[in-house]
Image (cartoon, rainbow, N blue to C red):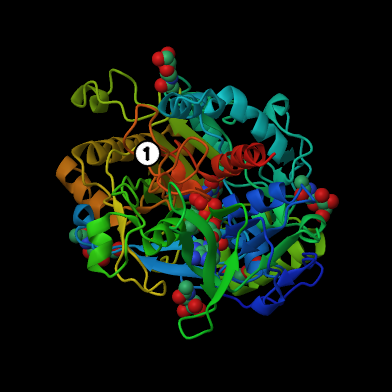
Amino acid sequence: MFKSVILSVAIALQANLQVAHGALLTDPTKIGNNYDFVVVGAGIGGSVVANRLSENPAWKVLLIEAGINNAGLEDISIPFFAPRDSPNEIWTWNYTTVPQTGLLGRTLTYQRGKILGGTSSINYMMFTRGSSDFWDNIANWTGDSSWGWKNIYNYFIKLETFTPPADGHDTTGQYDPSVHGTSGPLAVSLPGAANELSPFIFQTQQNEASHWPFILDANSGNQLGLGWLQATINGSTRASAATAYLAPQYISRPNLDVLIEQQVTKVLFNTNVKGAPQATGVTFASGPKAKVYTVKAKKEVILSGGSIGSTHLLLLSGIGDKNALKKVGVSSIFNNAEVGSNLIDHPCITNHWVANTTNSLDLLRENSTALADAIANYDATGKGRLVDTVSPAMGLFRFPDNSDFIQSNPGVKTASGPKAAEYEFLWIDGWGSFLPVPGPSGFYLTLSQVILSPSSRGTITLNSASPWVFPTIDTAFLTTEYDLDISRAAFKDARTFMSDKAWKGYNLGEAFDQSAFQTDAQIDSYLRNNTTPAYHMTSTNRIQSHKGGDGVVDNTLKVVGVSGLRVVDNSVFPFIIEGHPEATIYALAERASDYIKATWA
Ligand SMILES: Cc1cc2nc3c(=O)[nH]c(=O)nc-3n(C[C@H](O)[C@H](O)[C@H](O)COP(=O)(O)OP(=O)(O)OC[C@H]3O[C@@H](n4cnc5c(N)ncnc54)[C@H](O)[C@@H]3O)c2cc1C
Ligand SMILES: *[C@@H]1O[C@H](CO)[C@@H](O)[C@H](O)[C@H]1NC(C)=O
Ligand SMILES: *[C@@H]1O[C@H](CO)[C@@H](O)[C@H](O)[C@H]1NC(C)=O
Ligand SMILES: *[C@@H]1O[C@H](CO)[C@@H](O)[C@H](O)[C@H]1NC(C)=O
Ligand SMILES: *[C@@H]1O[C@H](CO)[C@@H](O)[C@H](O)[C@H]1NC(C)=O
Ligand SMILES: *[C@@H]1O[C@H](CO)[C@@H](O)[C@H](O)[C@H]1NC(C)=O
Ligand SMILES: *[C@@H]1O[C@H](CO)[C@@H](O)[C@H](O)[C@H]1NC(C)=O
């Protein structure tokens, strides 16, 4: 994973890699004045919605993005370079959390993309739809059966084209073609280069199949088991919301304008209307000292700034806890203390072992000649190890009823249902870490563990009335006993996995950073010192329960208490996905687009 996998070798731009976009605007004076819809943020949610709404030639759509164009950037398009895409790049928001009480007071850097495609342009491309229970639980929560797996499945088929891996190998037995799409905008594929670890991973699975069962396709609604990783990669290049939904044939539509390098600073409301205040448009600017522009929306403003961006904008615009907003000088439009609460993210740890090899990805991290050779080979052939993201396989598991963890947490169920996983394993052929420390010299392998349905809840709150001051972010990791217990149980299971006989001769034992931690108390301090986010933050603007009360948006993603405003991004899910969120956000935005179309039909 991660920054430390590769050296920061400068790479010449390859003009042939990505077709330039059609009509992209950077000059605010060039935009129109009669938009039906203004969409804020060209990440996953916003790119899908802008694309689908502009299918109707009668509607004029403006998509505004704070970040830069993605076209022509090899660091973004080459899958292997995902770990070098954050933090602190020209295309990232450089958030940090408050000191984490559950993590020995450490502060965490928090990554988000500030570029066309949003975080899908800088993420690790792992594509997981979630279990059928995840979606059916949302249907139950909203009282809207159209959010259930059966209906959302149609959107997964619609949005996807399953594409052959870069090396063209026979994929029989590595996925189930019958549950995949063949004509959608977004490419999804299997690993496209041989990976040293795959034989060991799958041999361990076979040796202990009752402990870690095989799953042919974790995107079928049944996710439990260990299988080949699916990722948003088309042949040798990253597929993102920008390359898929803002591709030249869409962005060139005369009724779609995409304005980049402009940050939306506020949603404007008309309060002189009968009923709820009505969103009428937004203000935006390129920086704190730049000219502020206004653009109106005749039908709706749609916020797709992501869990941090959209929450920040709602608060800045007066939708949030009235008293808290007053303290920083923001006047209230609608009092709702739910905005920015219920924050959920996945705690993640990268565990390390010493590998008996001279050919892991550490070679490319340490040896600039080897990396230059790999790049030259990639540029010439579109093949080789740079075509893949960090893990060849993925395991999504639950603890059995007779396990120590379940026995010591009787009756506690945080996952969506019995088909939903509790923890995840990923493997890296080399040293990977989200910690801000450089990887050590030598050859390693990494097993990353992710806790999929934590019970801790964090917050986003306003720090200032200025849109240029970041909000206060508290991920609240490991603040419940349950989360510490399950992290410890997952760590012990990771040790069991890596000590299977399949690894004999390759795995030479635990690396220096973890081998000393043996007792439960020692393991807990290891967990608190090494947990980082998986960067899947969700639920800060969650959908209301049909039983009433809590929530920020209704089942059609309209913001409650006002009119003409929706939120379409990862912030609206009432629960966190047991997996990686990008697939679910593409589907959510497809579903939302149909709701918006139906509203204005
Ligand atoms: C390092 C890393 C690895 C990850 N790996 C994976 C993975 O392998 N698989 C997976 O499924 N998920 C992964 N994720 C998470 C996933 O990419 C995000 O959850 C997802 O992209 C969120 O989508 P979104 O539409 O909610 O927001 P985003 O994709 O973040 O898009 C929001 C957009 O809005 C823009 N914006 C925000 N505020 C404003 C404003 N005021 N004005 C104008 N524009 C604004 C932002 O610049 C951005 O472009 C990863 C994340 C990170 C950081
Ligand atoms: C993030 O850090 C990079 C590198 O310092 C910088 O270029 C970029 O402008 C920063 N982004 C924001 C939103 O501050
Ligand atoms: C949803 O509700 C139905 C009816 O109460 C129930 O049978 C089902 O188990 C629930 N599904 C989930 C995933 O919670
Ligand atoms: C994948 O890339 C090929 C070659 O550039 C292109 O023709 C095809 O349309 C792409 N597929 C998807 C689903 O983007
Ligand atoms: C670095 O990689 C090159 C090319 O693969 C190889 O010839 C060389 O021996 C390597 N150097 C070291 C110090 O391992
Ligand atoms: C390392 O691998 C080599 C080649 O497979 C093998 O001969 C050797 O015994 C291994 N070393 C250890 C310590 O297991
Ligand atoms: C935490 O980890 C860092 C390395 O990332 C190490 O230097 C430090 O000693 C560790 N602290 C504790 C309390 O384990």
* Residue that appears at 45% across and 29% down: 138
Question: What is the quadrant of residue 409 in the picture?
Answer: top left
With respect to residue 7, does 34 lie above or below?
above
Q: Would you call the spot at circle 1 few (<14 residues within 10 Å), some (14-19), or many (20 or more)?
A: some
Residue bearing mark 1: 494
Query: Can residue 513 be seen at all in this image of the molecule?
Result: no
- Foreground of the two, 335 or 194: 335
Residue 442 placement (x, y as % from top left): 45, 63
Q: Is residue 150 left or right of residue 528?
A: right
**Residue 220 image-quadrant placement:** top right
Q: Quadrant of the C terminus?
A: top right
Q: Residue at x 74, y 62 (%)?
A: 378
Q: Is residue 536 something that shows in the picture? A: yes
**SS for callout 1:** helix
- Rendering coords of residue 13 (x, y %): 72, 75
Please tell me which residue is depicted at 22% across the width and 46% down the height of the picture. 523
Q: Position of residue 441 (x, y in %)?
A: 44, 67
Q: Amino acid at mark 1?
A: Ala
In this view, the residue in front, 365 or 403, is 403
Whether residue 58 sits left or right of residue 151 in the image: it is right
Report the side of 114 relative to 258 (left or right).
left
